[in-house]
Image: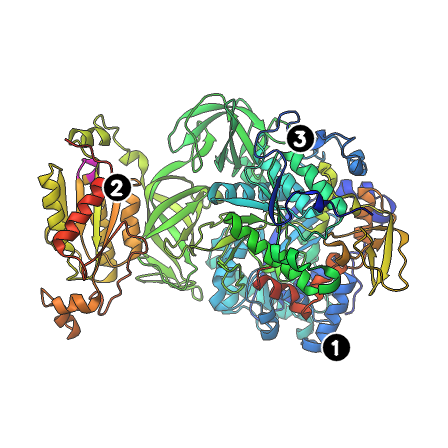
Amino acid sequence: MGLCPIVAYPALNGAISVGSGRTFPKANPCHGATYHPGKFHLFACAARLGQGGHTMTIANRSPELSAQTLTHLERLEAESIHIIREVVAEAENPVMLYSVGKDSAVMLHLARKAFYPAPPPFPLLHVDTTWKFQAMYELRNQMAEMTGMELLVYHNPEAQERGINPFDHGALHTDMWKTEGLKQALDKYGFDAAFGGARRDEEKSRAKERIFSFRTSTHGWDPKNQRPELWNLYNARKNKGESIRVFPISNWTELDVWQYIHVNNIPIVPLYFADERPTVERDGMLLMVDDDRFPLREGEVPVMRSIRFRTLGCYPLTGAVESKAKTLPEVIQETLLTTTSERQGRAIDKDAGGAGMEVKKQQGYF
Amino acid sequence: MTQDPVYVTDALIAEDIEAYLETHQHKTMLRFITCGSVDDGKSTLIGRLLYDSKMIFEDQLAALEADSKKQGTQGQGIDFALLVDGLAAEREQGITIDVAYRFFTTEKRKFIVADTPGHEQYTRNMVTGASTADLAVILIDARKGVLTQTRRHSFLAHLIGIRNIVLAVNKMDLVDYSQSRFDEIVADYRAFAASIGIEGFTALPISGYMGDNITSLSPNMPWYQAPAYFGRSLMDHLETVEVGQAREVAQPFRMPVQWVNRPNLDFRGFAGLVASGSVKPGDAVRVLPSGKTSTVARIVTFDGDLDEAVAGQSITLTLADEIDCSRGDVLALADNPPQVADQFEAQVVWLSDAPLIPGRAYWLKSGTQMVSATVQAPKYTVNVNTMEHVAADTLELNAIGVAHVTTDRAITFEPYGENRTLGGFILIDKITNATVAAGMLQSALRRAENVHWQALDITRDARASAKTQRPAVLWFTGLSGSGKSTIANLVEKKLHALGKHTFLLDGDNVRHGLNKDLGFNEADRIENIRRVGEVARLMTDAGLIVLTAFISPFRAERELARSLIPDGEFFEVFVDTPLAVAESRDVKGLYKKAREGKIPNFTGISSPYEPPVAPEIRIDTTSISPEDAAELIVAKLLGDYWMPEI
């Protein structure tokens, strides 16, 4: 295991810009099905099963459906694109939070569709903890290049300085790197609208959150005082100091996300597919030893296991599942047959009992 | 829990995942709402649908069982409501307080359920949930029958245009599965539904708690399978009911333009969600409200050009001609365009704690159009319990009324009953930015064709340059006795001496003529300021520098006046005199009378003054003389603001 790739960048505090900026891509007009298969060999399993990348057009529809009836994925896609365009039309300085996970992948793909043939007219922001899986950093940089979007990477300088890490600091790690880091990054750039890939089916308090969700100047969320959201008319007008979190894939389920990735050949981090990886079993979770910063406890020896991840975060906090699913359909199959819900692999939701996420959100967690 | 879940995991998933994915890729979607009173069992029903369609995972189920023992109301059984009630506060109270969205899927459909609250003060949430729904499930407790809330929810669902109504008579297990009780309730409901114009509904006897007639027909109610009844389970109905999308597609093409996509000089695309109809390359289209026509060149998407796009798709169109078209315009079928108007009759649902102020300007958003609009006092409101029409001066939280709405410029619209996108709107408070109302345009009172702007040969610019000045409005605001008129008079004299063409509007020359029909209550004061703003606009069109000297106590009205005047030409002058100082001056003896209660609604005493937040000019009269203040204002106007020398 090498070093975490983040150290290769010149500056560790504040932002780093990667990618070719906001220019119109020259060689490869950002087309989902046309990325170089060699370069993105890790997603070969997704590409192999695709149907040529034109599956969302009317021409490729099931013969039983009349041309007039849209499928559920077509309705969801149209709604999400509509939301993304509304934000760009009404916000002054929007940004897309990009966590490199599968939901981010879908959200980014929808943004590209919304503004095609132009690249999306906003930057990507990765609020980094320096503890993500290496494969996530690789995909992040590749996607910035492929889309022609500006990539901003933010590290909380205080967390950096104090060496906050998931092994020694527990909940403080998430709080400082992610919650505080996000607030700092949004304030630093003055972003007034931030796209996030949260879905309402993930968690109970998300189910009640609006698509346009307002935050106070201190980034707090008041669930009792949300604006009514009618039809597809979104009120993006904000008061001084307020900012908006916008969730374009609110109405998607985990299965919808997988199915859409499958149909559209969207590149995702290979960790979602099973492979032999070095692991240790700790506190009932299977953890992957992603680099040599992983402090092994006495008696712990990394064991190669065929594992994959249902959700991706900081590698020391993300539990793997043992799996043989090497292709996207196999992953979907496993997801459908499984009996534990998606976030179970994440330690974060277990804090503070049943209301954990709601409390975190009121404090400004995305 | 008597029945096994019917929606067992599809064997196809394990046997042939690719075939399964192929099937599921082509599923349709149904969005529905459930509504009922507090204890009708909505959350339990939704929890049951999730449970029976295998949407509850093992870990969630374990947590649910633990929670049920701790807080549940169902003894040792599983309390499905706990699965659905999300926020911590309501978990404690045991009620649903907001709109929650739930998802489940079967082989035939994906479902999105809006769970909407049952009690009176939350009508706004019900309207919110209903606005995106294709179908409404109205729940009735079989023991209680048709209640006030049942009537209210049915009325709201009908108001918002939901055509598929399902009457679910719940808790049948608690009335011994009685056929006669079911018949009685359905007869009651039928009479009511007909009276408010609901043309048809589907009635089912169910038990959310026991699972009767939810995913399969219940052996406890064999009578329900007789031909006189619907005879199918709730899930069966939800999976097969016609989703009304064909109706939208059959209508003429309309697409509000969301965004003009210009990546380079060779591409100009108009992006939007098709609201109705369908469109093909070669179709003749018209841009509203300008009326200009062109032809669709391409339908551009990331996945390649389309031969046709239909209602519900987000697309980008290019046109054959270079014509003006921007966000807020509507692209429509050329020979069947929607109407353009600026005065409407509309149904308005008030969603805010702050009541409607008739005549105040709000932002109105409809499709992608955002305009300034005023709402008159309602013609009537509807008592949602009795459906009676009631006279009212305003609209309070949760009130539903019919009122005239006037927009400051013509907008493209269709009656809500014909087109939800072009007929639905929201109102936004200009100061708090809260969404305060939802509305449905019913008809135009005055079509824009009849008041079409006369194209004038002599333009605004031409009139101004003949006077060698740029028009401006100096809007003086402040308490009575603050010194507005004094300073404004001095400013006008100075400008006049410089050869500028000016006009001063104040209480004397307006209240005695143009506005002599107005009193001093809040609504009349707003109308007073609105008229002054309009007159100021006309005068700036004539090229004049206009000075106005009115207390104009409300921020919203000053913002309305500002919105009428082109950017950069409006100067808010805050004559800042503390109340104590103004009162001690009391030039006209008005404060004394107000303190004695002889003048109602007197600003500063019995009516509020909202000071400007960011005025262009602020005059502190406690530290500067009127003469110096006038100098300062003229200098600011001449310095900050371009006015060519003679």
State the CA–CA distance, disc 2 to disc 3. Answer: 50 Å
Mark 3 = which residue?
A31
3 or 1: mark nearer the eye: 3
Magenta-drawn segment = B540-544
Looking at the picture, tell me which residue is in the foreground, B89 or A230. Answer: B89
**Colour logic:** rainbow
Q: Earlier in the sequence, mark 2 or mark 1?
A: 1
* Vertical placement of residue A217 versus B292, above or below: below
**In the image, residue B299 lies in the stretch drawn in magenta:** no
Dots 2, 3 in contact, CB < 8 A: no
2 or 1: mark nearer the eye: 2
Dividing the picture into quarters, in which one does residue B534 lie? top left
x, y percent for residue A75: 62, 42
Mark 1 = which residue?
B76
Mark 1 surroundings: few (<14), some (14-19) or many (≥20) residues within 10 A = few
State the CA–CA distance, disc 3 to disc 1. Answer: 55 Å
Q: Is residue B601 visible?
A: no
